Image: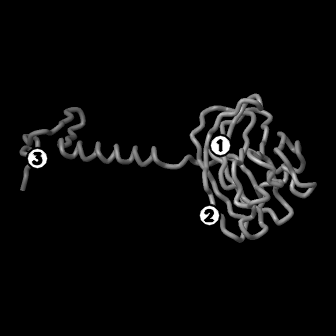
Amino acid sequence: MTTFREKLNRPGIFYNEEDKTHIYLEDFIALENAINLLEARVTALEPIITTELIPVMTDYNLPSGLCSSSNEIGTSYVSWKAFQNLFPTDFEGWATVWLGFPEWLQYEFVTSKIVIAYSVTSRNEGGNSRVPKSWTFEGSNNNVDFDVLDTQNDVVDWASEGNIKKTFNITNTTAYLYYRLNINASNDVSYVGVGTLQMYE
């Protein structure tokens, strides 16, 4: 059996005279490796979504902010209906006739926000729900010059029943007033639509 004194004479030991504790070099290296592994795993974790930023909208500018889009179909598929924060029925959400590229859906905050994630929910009308296929998520502070914060291409795995929510984490440290989903392709040949668009900090 190894005595305490023999352990003290063991090469590579760190001994603290103040509290009489000791640790061996190989133990220290193992602990350091474990800490490095834990830090790497924490770094790789997805951002923690804590707050939904867009309120439940009841009109283009109520209760706050401003909803807008490139086009709309009548009064049933207007832009603000994509910001009601619900699982939409067939006659909810935003939709437009596909007039060309791009089509966009936008929300303007009252004060600038740092968005770290956003979610897109498909409309509940069966089929592919005419959901976006390729798009960029963008931010701006003047509604003219937009920075691309995220790019998605060929997103085709929307389930046929509709009301499918997909969340996308982004790396963003800039506060913007305007955020938009700038759609470059649709899963439908004639229309594109979004059931719900939400943003998070």
Number of marks drawn: 3
Query: CA–CA distance between discs 3 and 2?
Result: 63 Å
**Residue 174 x, y percent position in the rendering:** 63, 32
**Residue 36 x, y percent position in the rendering:** 34, 43
N-terminal of the pair, mark 1 or mark 2, is: 2
In the image, taking residue 157 as reference, residue 193 lies left or right, namely right
N-terminal of the pair, mark 3 or mark 2, is: 3
Q: Which residue is mark 3?
A: 4
Colour scheme shown: one colour
N-terminal of the pair, mark 1 or mark 3, is: 3
Q: Which residue is mark 2?
A: 157
**Residue 54 x, y percent position in the rendering:** 76, 46
Rate crowding at label 3 as few (under 14), some (14 to 19) or many (20 or more) other CA atoms within 10 Å.
few
Query: CA–CA distance between discs 1 and 3?
Result: 54 Å
Please report the residue visible at 20 percent of the width from the left and 42 percent of the height from the top: 23
Q: Secondary structure at mark 1?
A: loop
Rate crowding at label 2 as few (under 14), some (14 to 19) or many (20 or more) other CA atoms within 10 Å.
few
Nearest to viewer (mark 3 / mark 2): 2
Q: Amino acid at mark 1?
A: Glu
Q: Amino acid at mark 3?
A: Phe
Residue 191 position (above or below residue 22): below
